[in-house]
Amino acid sequence: MNRESERRQEIEKFELLKPGLARIWAELQTDSDYEHTSVIVPSLSVNQEELSKVLGSSHYEERLLFALIRLKNPNARLIYVTSQPIHPDIVDYYLHLLDGVTLNQARQRLLMVSVCDASARPLSEKILERPRFLARLRNQIGDPSRAYLTCYNSTVLERRLAVALGIPLNGADPELLYYGTKSGSREVFRQTGVSFPAGYEDLRSREEIIQALARLANDRPGISRAVVKLNEGFAGEGNGVFTYPKQRDEDAIRNALRDLKWSSRQETLDTFMKKFEEMGGIVEEMIEAEETRSPSVQMRIYPEGTSTLVSSHEQVLGGSTGQAYLGCRFPANGAYRSTLQNEAEKIGVLLSEKGVVGRFGIDFLVTRSAGGQWVHHAIEINLRMGGTTPPFHALEFLTGGTLDIASGLFRAPDGHEKYYSATDNLKSAAYRGLLPEDLFQIITRHGLGFRHSTDTGVLFYMIGALSQYGKIGMTCIGNSADEAKTLFKKTVELLDAQTDSDSHSHGITAPIFDRYLTME
């Protein structure tokens, strides 16, 4: 059988599995105690060269530990697969936070397994090349008609894994992933009538970039900068900022392209262009104004086709080009939150019609001049989980509350509104060497943990990256935006005091750290 025949056969089997996800979802809507198994494979199946720019990226597999919330269902089983074993104290940290479930009960229904492979490759690929491991995993799943697979993102690797396990994938069909690329996002925005920056998509070469930059300068005579983006870049790492020279002809632009700037110091024009030719990309106007913000809206399309709002955030961006994702605040600003949610709904409806299933996010840019109104532009669609996914699900995990879709606000069961400030990029050289047990000792001694009595406090994640990289993520939950910001500040100050850290060494500070404390 040739490769194309194998691909078609794989797709046919994948299609046959899809109805199983809709059936399980329907059962869970009528019976919250429905017996089922969730298989979590937090594979970062993205360009590994781009991923290598993210410090401690191997520990990002821990970001889906919020999925342990599913163990609140007394009949739910959960299998969590990782490249390297996760420290048992980290797992217990999450299980202890499950309200109404004893540690012993949760452990009996949780299976943590690892392929023991730290190589810089997607976890799904590592699983697929281990037939004995796959066979054991199938046996541990039990009844495949009551199981489904959840991953960080969906590619052909995840499709192949779903077929190998004989269970449906809770995510976008890889055949539809174009709509989550930079080029595909612009096509969706155009079809829905959502405002987006001027630019050109589906580019494949250096010459096409140069021609697009020249046309863009003609379209926008006052433009000073543009962004050249890889179709499959993420967290801002695949974005190069271009500054226009005084002359706007193609020869001048060709010379100026040598000075393209990226957040990562590892990137060069040659390495960037090689990736650009492989995956394609876009050129678009870099919209600049007196005040700019980068909110995002998260959506979900259920297996039966319903699109719904999940959350909204103010994203904090930084790095040398201001393009790298550093953290977020929930919810997005009330001055434009409703407008962005309405725009996201249009996009959700269209993607649902195209057959997309699962979670996705939409990044926006909003701008205004002094005394003016906010103007919004859709920037990109991410057909996957993202940096805003762990903190929001931490909120669900810890409080058991729900989002009020009309207002975009989150309310705990007691009716209190909840807010948070979060980052997955808190880092300091002084934090290196802290083991999980050291962190938990600090949390216990200084009362940093989450308190179910008030539904406020701090949840840490990516704890495994702390000792080697001095990096950790955290979500600081309060009953007001000010309380969440204050808790964020106090937590950073406490960690610094416990490690003799200089706060100016953080990846999120001066001036980025201040934005957490001043952004309304």
Image (cartoon, grey):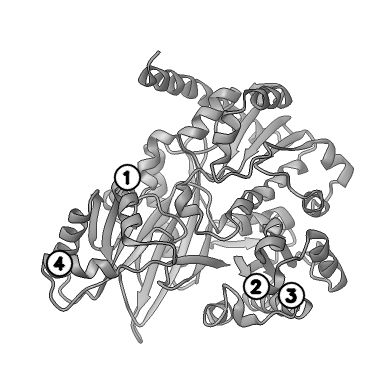
User: How much space separates mark 2 and mark 3, taking CA atoms?
Assistant: 10 Å
Q: How many marks?
A: 4
Q: Quadrant of residue 30?
A: top right
Residue lying farthest bottom?
370
Q: Is the residue marked by circle 1 packed among few (<14), some (14-19), or many (20+) residues within 10 Å?
A: few
Residue that badge 4 annotates:
219
Foreground residue among 67 and 320? 320
- Relative to 338, say whether 27 is above or below: above
Q: Position of residue 124 (x, y in %)?
A: 56, 36
Judge left or right: residue 130 versus residue 447. Answer: left
Judge left or right: residue 26 versus residue 477. Answer: left
The disc labelled 1 sits on which kind of residue?
Glu
Q: Nearer the viewer, mark 1 or mark 3?
A: 1
Q: Position of residue 273 (x, y in %)?
A: 30, 54
The mark that comes first in sequence, 1 or 2, is 1
Residue that badge 1 annotates:
278
- Residue drawn at the location 79% of the way across and 70% of the way down: 448
Judge left or right: residue 37 versus residue 177. Answer: right
The mark that comes first in sequence, 4 or 2, is 4
User: How much space separates mark 1 and mark 3, taking CA atoms?
Assistant: 43 Å
Whether residues under marks 4 and 2 lie with C-beta atoms below 8 angstroms apart, the answer is: no
User: How much space separates mark 1 and mark 2, taking CA atoms?
Assistant: 35 Å
Residue that badge 2 annotates:
428
Residue that badge 3 annotates:
495
Q: Position of residue 374 (x, y in %)?
A: 37, 74
Q: Nearer the viewer, mark 4 or mark 2?
A: 2
User: How much space separates mark 1 and mark 4, taking CA atoms?
Assistant: 28 Å
Whether residues under marks 2 and 3 lie with C-beta atoms below 8 angstroms apart, the answer is: yes
